[in-house]
Image (tube, rainbow, N blue to C red):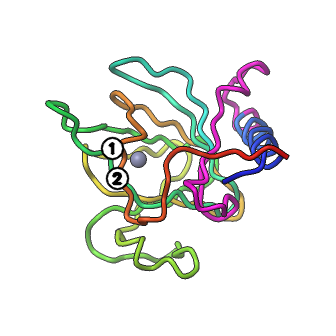
């Protein structure tokens, strides 16, 4: 869970990083930024900040922010009825993003969050610099991480159903709980 103060501060920090990346975001759009700690109460290390530009029944466009050294936990977007699951294209805007997908273990630059080895099984590292993009086919497990400078990236995808995402770490809760105070 996050305190209201942590949530608001994270939103503001994400807003500044998006603005500094050159992506135009209006002041009133700060409330379209969501902060996810995945129920782990360790936002600085594991979590993500998401500015949803739009999300319709069929497509969505988001700007994702990773704070310095922050990691988005390993997950996948499962099929729903006749839909094979979310297909997602990531395009790095600012900072370096390290993606991990199934395949040969070539992990060089990244690190597994402390004590969480069992929950980060993908070790095939793909490093994205600004302007690089990566397509994640439906159902592909993935996790991603940035370095000490943080990162901002686009995520374009088919219909989003975040609450149905699967996570390797059984302790994860997708909906962020905010406690007042
Ligand atoms: Zn994903």
Residue 147 point in image, percent of width and height? 64, 64
Residue 34 point in image, percent of width and height? 63, 37
Q: Nearer the viewer, residue 101 or 20?
A: 101
Q: Residue at x 54, y 61 (%)?
A: 145
Residue labelled with disc 1: 135
Q: Nearer the viewer, residue 88 or 174?
A: 174
> Magenta stretch containing residue 21, yes or no?
yes
Residue 11 point in image, percent of width and height? 74, 39
Q: Secondary structure at mark 2?
A: strand
Residue 85 falls in which quadrant of the image? top left
Q: Secondary structure at mark 1?
A: strand
Residue at the farthest front position:
180
Q: Residue at x 30, y 37 (%)?
A: 87
Q: Which mark is residue 173?
A: none
Residue 103 falls in which quadrant of the image? bottom left
Q: Quadrant of the N terminus?
A: bottom right
Q: Which residues are magenta?
A: 19-48
Residue labelled with disc 2: 166
Q: Is residue 137 above or below residue 119?
A: above
Q: Residue at x 25, y 43 (%)?
A: 138
> Magenta stretch containing residue 139, yes or no?
no
2 vs 1, front mark: 2
Q: Is residue 127 left or right of residue 149?
A: left
């Amino acid at each position: 869970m996050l305190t209201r103060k942590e949530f608001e501060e994270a939103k503001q920090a994400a807003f500044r990083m998006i603005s500094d990346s050159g992506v135009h975001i209006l002041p009133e759009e700060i409330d379209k930024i969501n902060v996810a700690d995945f129920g782990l109460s360790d936002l600085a290390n594991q979590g993500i900040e998401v500015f949803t530009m739009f999300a319709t029944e069929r497509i969505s466009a988001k700007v994702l922010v990773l704070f310095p050294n922050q990691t988005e936990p390993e997950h996948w977007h499962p099929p729903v009825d006749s839909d094979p699951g979310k297909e997602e294209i990531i395009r790095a805007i600012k900072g370096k993003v390290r993606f991990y997908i199934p395949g040969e273990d070539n992990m060089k630059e990244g690190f597994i969050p402390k004590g969480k080895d069992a929950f980060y099984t993908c070790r095939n590292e793909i490093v994205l610099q600004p302007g690089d993009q990566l397509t994640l086919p439906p159902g592909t497990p993935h996790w991603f991480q940035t370095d000490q400078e943080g990162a901002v990236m686009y995520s374009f995808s088919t219909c989003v159903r975040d609450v149905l995402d699967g996570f390797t770490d059984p302790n994860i809760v997708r909906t962020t709980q905010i406690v007042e105070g």
